Amino acid sequence: MKAIILAAGRGSRLQPITDKIPKPLVRIGGETLVERHLKALATASVTEVVINLSYLGRQIEEFVGDGTKFGIDVHYSREGNKPLETLGGILKALPLLQPTNDFVVINSDIWTDYCFKNLKAPTLKGHVVLTQKPSDVSHGDFDLTSGIVTQSRINPFIFTGISTYNTSAFSELVVEQKKLGPLLRKWAISKNLTGEIHAGLWFDIGTKARLKRAQLETQDYR
């Protein structure tokens, strides 16, 4: 399988840390977020990755190179100074992965102990990894019923930023600045999305408080 790592965001909520480095190069436990993802994908037999770039993207490209040091073949989808958001970034990067019937997408700004060897290929339009809604999040993203992602009144789970998709699900979409979330909710309503629950460690490194929490709670992680 092949993969896309979404790494184009500015990370404004992590300022001043992200004034000088892009969010994927933030370190937890001595390693950057992006290198952790690349190593995890390589151990799961993913052979090729496209990383989308915008804000301080040259730093990511210089750090990762062609991926040889991480045991994986890396290419880049350069979006210029105006990032295309998550869905737009996927659509622009996807041609660089062809030919492929399905692919993995990972948000670069997460830290997790999820085992990518267990990540399922999509049987419908996509398959997402969910986790229990953290206490500091007021509204969840999805519910899950017999492996099918749904929308409910409580939505007790949030999307981890780890997923697989059927390439054909994107075939009629045009590249534009657009978020992925609304499309996932549409697929959930139409029951075209499967899912699983990750009960292990997962952190959204979106703010300084969340970064600090991740650094503290992963100190003893091996």
Image: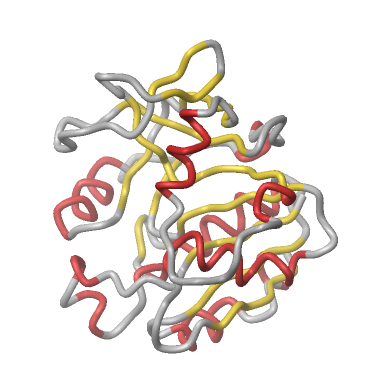
Asked if residue 158 lies left or right of residue 191, the reply is left
Rendered view: 132 above or below 40: above
**Residue that appears at 46% across and 85% down:** 59
Rendered view: 107 above or below 51: above
The number of numbered discs placed on residues in the rendered structure image is: 0
Where is residue 65 drawn, in percent x and y?
A: 63, 81
Which residue occupies the foreground of this view, 180 or 53?
180
Which residue occupies the foreground of this view, 134 or 139?
139
Where is residue 88 drawn, in percent x and y?
A: 51, 66
Where is residue 143 drawn, in percent x and y?
A: 39, 22
- Tell me which corner region of the image, top left, top right, bottom left or bottom right, holds residue 141: top left
Where is residue 112 drawn, in percent x and y?
A: 43, 43
Rendered view: 143 above or below 164: above
- Tell me which corner region of the image, top left, top right, bottom left or bottom right, holds residue 73: bottom right
Q: Determine the residue located farthest toward the right in the rendered image.
A: 99
Which residue occupies the foreground of this view, 133 or 112?
133
**Residue that appears at 73% across and 69% down:** 95
- Tell me which corner region of the image, top left, top right, bottom left or bottom right, holds residue 108: bottom left
**Residue that appears at 45% across and 19% down:** 144
Asked if residue 86 lies left or right of residue 164, the reply is left
**Residue that appears at 37% across and 71% down:** 9
Which residue occupies the foreground of this view, 43 or 3?
3
Q: Determine the residue located farthest toward the top in the rendered image.
A: 146
How are the residues colored?
A: secondary structure
Asked if residue 66 lies left or right of residue 210, the reply is right
